[in-house]
Amino acid sequence: MYQSFIDHPAMNTPIPPFKVDSKSLQTFVDSQWDEKILPALTDYIAIPAKSPAYDAQWAENAYLERVVKDAAQWIESQKLPGLKLEIIRLANNGKTRTPVLFFEVPATKPDSSDTILLYGHLDKQPEFSGWRNDLGPWTPKYQENKLYGRGGADDGYAVYAALTAIMALDKQGIPRPRCVGLIETCEESGSYDLLPYVDALKDRLGNVSLVVCLDSGAGNYDQLWITTSLRGNIGGVLDVQMLDEGVHSGDSSGIVPSTFRIMRQVLDRLEDSKTGRLLPESFYCEVPPERLAQAELTAQILGDEVWKRFPWSCGQDGGFTLPMTQQPVQALLNRTWRPTLSVTGAEGLPPLSSAGNVLRPRTAFKLSLRLPPLVDACTAIQTLKSLLEDNAPYNAKVNFRPDQGSATGWNAPTTAPWLTAALDEASQQHYGAPCGYIGQGGTIPLMNMLEKGFPKAQFMVCGVLGPKSNAHGPNEFLHVPYGKRLTAAVAQVIGSCP
């Protein structure tokens, strides 16, 4: 077990009230990014630390272990007074779970019993295809204020930004509560390893009053954006089989049903292919009035950029392909409060270059289904499995194997007045614009866990994944100027904690 302790001199010495000097705060953060964070992230991007769902040999390959140790060494090198740092590895039926990096820094605020929890992750999505010729998932490149490569924005920067925010406050002598960091390596696989760690660390987490999550997105790069909700995610492999081996298509077609056609029929039970609307009503929930109002305000800020920000291809007659809706409010609700289905992979289909006249015995699709924030994932999985498997056409062998890392979504609790004021002040000071609020279509399983475990906690869920940053896809980048301002904004909010 890696463990480090740094002595802290007179942490309980009273510190007089002090207003944050936003300009000095930003100057310190900018310097830290340029001199220390960017070099660390460049090294991090070069390591193919794929999440366990995408690297079955993750333990043997030890890439996750490497990025965790690198982050731990970087944290220790900052010599933050009072720091306690540990890499924790829990066992799971004789095997080791994915490691978690845990650090804590004592309060500088007299008589404070609260804890601020800062969260991020170091595991990555797989390579994907379509990267520019001069870019690659494991080839970091800094160009036009963007750091390209897999994982820098999602979410390698988080651990470095979190510690820098704490250091920025301490440098000015701004009193703050105790801070702990929880950095996992299983998020992109659904965080299935995380709950045992949260249970094991619950006493050490303390009285969590504010959660700062640095794994979310931004509507633009012009202001601070706070995530108000996250969709849940269920998925798995839908497998359709009719034959034990492939047969001549001329000899068999018309007698043997195509597994692809059966797949279409089964999916038609789930989704209206003309509109994309999912059919089971249990996959829906009522959108809270506050979230509807926020979507309308966000639509006014972003306008058509809600949908124009995606890399649309040229369609028929030279025009661009079109979104499911061009109405900004409806587009925002579609990606945050309505269920959607994506097919993210397939098996049983040969490459075009070797596709002969064969009626294939099997078709398998990898399904990813995003759920509204208030829909329970466990219940939805059972509904989905029955819907897809029961009464199979032609008595085909239809099997749905759910993923291990499914997760229920999250809807933020009502924001306390002090936090609302602090967020807006931080956005004005570091971006020159008011704070924006937006729901996100992705999933961060820890948020739901933490709200249940710490029902009185406030949440600052934010991140650097703005327009065209393309997390999970090709050409992922971290918008460095936004990351710098976000780090300073986080520090300012922490310094405003009552």
Image: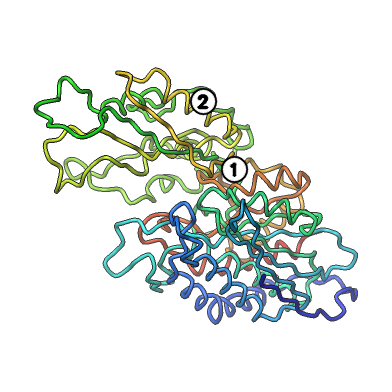
Dot 2 falls on a residue whose secondary structure is helix
Residue for point 70% across, 67% down? 103
> Which residue is identified by label 2?
383
x and y, in percent, of residue 138 in the image: 39, 68
Q: Which residue is mark 1?
A: 229
**Mark 1–mark 2 contact, CB under 8 Å?**
no
> Against 50, is 226 above or below?
above
Q: Position of residue 385 (x, y in %)?
A: 47, 28
Q: Secondary structure at mark 1?
A: strand
Q: Residue 82: x and y, percent?
A: 78, 75
Is 20 displayed left or right of 218 in the figure?
A: right
Q: Residue at x 75, y 75 (%)?
A: 170
Label 1 vs label 2: CA separation? 23 Å
Residue type pointed to by label 2: Thr
Q: Quadrant of the N terminus?
A: bottom right
> Viewer-proximal residue, 93 or 263?
93
Quadrant assignment, res 472: bottom left
Which quadrant of the figure has residue 99?
A: bottom right
Q: Is residue 151 above or below residue 348?
A: below
- Relative to 442, is 139 on the left or the right? left
Q: Amino acid at mark 1?
A: Ser
Indicate which disc, 1 or 2, sits on the residue closer to the N terminus: 1
141 lies left or right of 242: right
Q: Which residue is pictured at 30% across the width and 42% down the height?
A: 347
Specify the color scheme: rainbow
Quarter of the figure with the C terminus:
bottom right
